[in-house]
Image (spheres, rainbow, N blue to C red):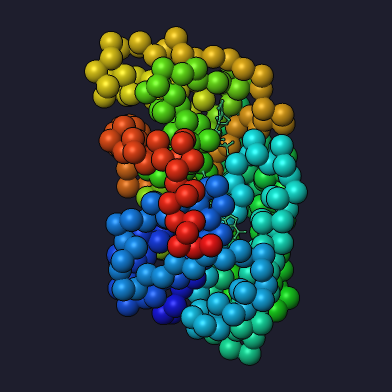
Amino acid sequence: MKNIMITGGAGFIGSHVVRLFVNKYPEYNIINVDKLTYAGNLCNLLDIENKSNYKFVKADICDLDNMITLFKEYSIDGVIHLAAESHVDRSIKDPLIFAQTNVMGTLALLQAAKLSWEGNFPGKLFYHISTDEVYGSLGFDGTFFTEDTSYDPHSPYSASKAASDHFVRAYNDTYGMATVVTNCSNNYGPYQFPEKLIPLFINNIRQGKPLPVYGKGENVRDWLYVVDHARAIDVIFHKGRIGDTYNIGGFNEWTNIDLIKVIIKTVDKLLGNPEGESLNLITYVTDRAGHDLRYAIDSNKLKTELGWEPSLQFEEGIEETVSWYLENQEWMDNITSGEYEKYYSEMYK
Ligand code: NAD
Ligand code: TYD
């Protein structure tokens, strides 16, 4: 495969995937297709934007005609699809855009791939990036989500991702298009939009602002360093079994409140504050509606079949992450001030 379309490449995970592929595979052409919603930020890619094997195209995946044009123009033979609305709290406030982007957008992209590749499917691949949230919620019973766990989404976000996963598999079953789906746990690391727990809290601690903990802070999430997710995507894109599903996770469960205490400790240490100084910023607030209690991924299939394992211990990953946000305050301030949206708006109208 030579010409790879990565959708959502200006977002958090997508930017790490673009960076990895552009640097590791100079023989590939990487076409980053992103609408630049509030979550898209081309400043995430400043280090690779001038590479000769990289091209950015501002486009909406929901626009079928334009997607067909792009498949043709760039002779696309592989897709890594990450573009999505991704924040649960936003999906509770405005579910329609989640159905539009995540369901209809994925369907438009699938249809563009089918129309472009039909009669010539060998060597083509549509790789869809999804979430463990489609599996619903676990109890505190030590069980895990496996690839055979039934779908049971609870939020408009996870419902829309579940629907998109079903459409991807339907294109494999019905039309014989080569697809693969992966369901990953919560990611953390550089370039995450500061509406998500970890960057939001690092920034609030830096500014002495309250840390809004939903409910009792007892919900459990399974955290994976974003670069390890990008490494898994690389392995699965090249070696994954066609038509199959892989769970991606780091066997790294934390209750929110314990995680928040680690973040506070790390930020206070790196800022030279007295230990525990920012603990008083913890503020318990009304719980998120339909808040899933626990996510935990069993990624043994990926380890056994394809040899992937996380490269970073959590303690190391979180320290690197906190350091990155503290050292890149300009990146953060550009977002919180809204400046980042003006940055490229003239260039890409
Ligand atoms: P993000 O919100 O940071 O980025 C999403 C990107 O998609 C943005 O650049 C945005 O501009 C783009 N986009 C949105 N709508 C678009 C459209 N209509 N057309 C083209 N581009 C559009 O998201 P993320 O956290 O990087 O997540 C990427 C993918 O990974 C999503 O599919 C998400 O469901 C999945 N995922 C995320 C996590 C996580 O912890 N963040 C975990 C598992 C899976
Ligand atoms: P989030 O980063 O939004 O990811 P997701 O909802 O996809 O898991 O939230 C992670 C956890 O942190 C989740 O249990 C909700 C909780 N949370 C808070 O307690 N306060 C906050 O301000 C945010 C954004 C999240």
The residue lying toward the viewer, choosing from 4 and 141, is: 4
The residue lying toward the viewer, choosing from 44 and 30, is: 44
Is residue 267 visible in the rendered image? The answer is yes
From what the image shows, is residue 271 above or below residue 107?
above
The location of residue 283, given as percent across then percent down, is 54, 14
> Looking at the rendering, which quadrant does residue 246 occupy?
bottom right
Residue at 28% from the left image edge and 14% from the top image edge: 273
Q: Is residue 295 left or right of residue 17?
A: right
The residue lying toward the viewer, choosing from 115 and 153, is: 115
Q: Quadrant of the N terminus?
A: bottom left
Residue at 40% from the left image edge and 61% from the top image edge: 18
The location of residue 140, given as percent across then percent down, is 60, 27
The location of residue 100, given as percent across then percent down, is 72, 56
Residue at 55% from the left image edge and 77% from the top image edge: 70
Q: Is residue 160 left or right of residue 258?
A: right
Which residue appears farthest toward the front when viewing the image? 346
How many numbered circles does the render carry? 0
The location of residue 141, given as percent across then percent down, is 61, 29
From what the image shows, is residue 60 above or below residue 291?
below
Which residue appears farthest toward the left when viewing the image? 272
Q: Is residue 114 left or right of residue 77?
A: right
Q: Is residue 250 left or right of residue 24?
A: right
Residue at 53% from the left image edge and 35% from the top image edge: 195
Is residue 80 visible in the rendered image? The answer is no
